[in-house]
Image: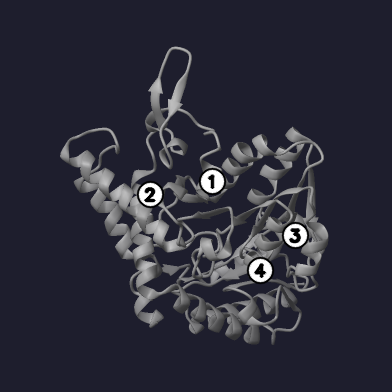
């Protein structure tokens, strides 16, 4: 993978910010979009903008064909068994809420257990908190090892015969750690629980095979993997989805409407109420084509190389603390850190003055911040368009930040 050539495909990166060439290191929040995706979105709105599944005219047929073709691309991308298992949503958050409401409310009772971990994104915490409140179930947390990883021994001790749902992120948006989802799914199933996976930070960076993982549900977002905002996917095993009720009603999810009763269409459309996210789905399909052309294995290898380079360079800065695994092969291209005596927001502000975009705050992971014994952190996240020169700019910027606050205070 020649990522210098790849970088040229992202128009937004060819600009200056505050008088410096842009270095974008916030892809864990949202990735940038290649020209192939931008052109597909432009083509949809210019040439065949129309609703799907409704009209028999040419534009409607073309839009429907492209929309459903995108569903098949998603199916292949994650190796689902059929398109009936692919539900288009607004994003990971909507997908996880759908599982919590539709599956959870029907299948959980008082004293049942839901198991998550301390590293989870708020979107994979709050739906389960609400489900526990409504059903009387108990919410339990998997402990973390010193480097933020999950121990299978701890998982076996935490997941019990009372556990009905285990929901874990595949990749941490803070620590970058890659969790052993396949093994966790095995433990969950041995105890009669279903395995839900927050794949928002995994789908952009690595090969996904839901059948090999043997997870029951898998959620991810298009905007983190070179696709548009506002589009995501819920994968669910057909055996579960067929028994679940929709949580939104109206539009093309309806089969027949009577005065007192109505029936729903078959999978996957019964979960896609109203006008679906047509342009978003088509754009996600284009993003998948783009990522497949590069190769998920090449993307992960590139990120491991960048992470190793960044860990080495950043570790030389005195007073800088890095959180998460110390070995690059155990993480994706996410490095979260703090600079001694400098607030993360100040770090991000100084770096922005140098044209370097990073994230600062609690990263929608306040329980993890508490576990780390900090209120917030700074985070640099890399993707397929980043280079070692970007890392060098980051390190130089951090040195300048440290010198600035040392001299001021």
Give the class, few, some or many, for how many residues have Cα within 10 Å of label 3's Cα (few <14, many ≥20): many
The quadrant in which the N terminus is found is: bottom left
Q: Say what secondary structure mark 4 lies in.
A: loop
Pointer 4 residue: 180
Q: Is residue 369 above or below residue 241?
A: below
Residue at 58% over, 85% down: 309
Q: Position of residue 330 (x, y in %)?
A: 64, 77
User: How far apart in space, not on screen, are marks 1 and 2 (Cα)?
Assistant: 27 Å
Q: Position of residue 235 (x, y in %)?
A: 50, 51
Query: Is 1 situated left or right of 117 in this image?
Result: left
- Residue 7 at least partly seen: no
Q: Which is closer to the viewer, label 1 or label 3?
A: 1
Q: Say what secondary structure mark 1 lies in.
A: helix
Give the class, few, some or many, for how many residues have Cα within 10 Å of label 2's Cα (few <14, many ≥20): many
Residue 368's mark?
3
Q: Position of residue 163 (x, y in %)?
A: 76, 49
User: How far apart in space, not on screen, are marks 4 and 2 (Cα)?
Assistant: 30 Å
Give 39 or 182, whichever is nearer the viewer.
182
Query: Who comes first in sequence, dot 4 or dot 2?
Result: 4
Residue at 80% over, 36% down: 110
Query: Who comes first in sequence, dot 4 or dot 3?
Result: 4
Pointer 2 residue: 280
Task: State the scheme by which the image is colored.
Answer: one colour
Residue 239's mark?
1
Q: Are marks 4 and 2 in contact (CB under 8 Å)?
A: no
């Amino acid at each position: 993978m020649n990522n210098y050539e790849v970088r040229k495909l992202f128009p937004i990166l060819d600009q200056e910010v505050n008088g410096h060439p842009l270095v974008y290191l916030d892809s864990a929040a949202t990735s940038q979009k290649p020209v192939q995706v931008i052109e597909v979105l432009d083509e949809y709105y210019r040439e065949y903008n129309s609703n799907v599944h409704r009209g028999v005219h040419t534009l409607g047929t073309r839009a429907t064909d492209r929309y459903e073709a995108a569903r098949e691309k998603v199916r292949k991308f994650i190796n689902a068994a059929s398109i009936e298992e692919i539900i288009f949503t607004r994003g990971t958050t909507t997908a996880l809420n759908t599982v919590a409401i539709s599956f959870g409310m029907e299948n959980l009772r008082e004293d049942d257990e839901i198991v998550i971990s301390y590293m989870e994104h708020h979107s994979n915490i709050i739906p389960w908190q609400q489900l526990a409140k409504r059903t009387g179930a108990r919410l339990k947390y998997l402990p973390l090892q010193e480097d933020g990883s999950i121990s299978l021994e701890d998982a076996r001790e935490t997941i019990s015969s009372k556990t009905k749902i285990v929901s874990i992120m595949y990749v941490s948006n803070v620590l970058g750690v890659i969790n052993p989802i396949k093994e966790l799914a095995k433990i969950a199933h041995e105890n009669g629980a279903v395995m839900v996976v927050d794949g928002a930070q995994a789908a952009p960076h690595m090969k996904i095979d839901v059948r090999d993982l043997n997870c029951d549900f898998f959620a991810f977002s298009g905007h983190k993997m070179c696709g548009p905002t506002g589009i995501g996917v819920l994968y669910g095993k057909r055996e579960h989805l067929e028994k679940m009720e929709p949580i939104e009603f109206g539009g093309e999810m309806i089969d027949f409407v009577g005065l007192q009763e109505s029936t729903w269409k078959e999978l996957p459309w019964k979960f896609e109420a109203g006008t679906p996210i047509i342009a978003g789905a088509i754009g996600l399909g284009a993003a998948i084509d783009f990522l497949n052309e590069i190769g998920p294995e090449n993307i992960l290898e590139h990120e491991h190389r960048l992470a190793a380079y960044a860990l080495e360079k950043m570790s030389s800065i005195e007073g800088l603390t890095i959180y998460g695994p110390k070995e690059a092969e155990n993480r994706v291209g996410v490095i979260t850190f703090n600079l001694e005596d400098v607030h993360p927001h100040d770090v991000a502000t100084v770096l922005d003055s140098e044209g370097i975009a990073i994230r600062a705050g609690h990263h929608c992971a306040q329980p993890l911040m508490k576990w780390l014994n900090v209120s917030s952190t700074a985070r640099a996240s890399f993707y397929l368009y980043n280079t070692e020169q970007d890392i060098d700019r980051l390190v130089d910027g951090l040195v300048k930040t440290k010198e600035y606050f040392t001299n001021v205070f």
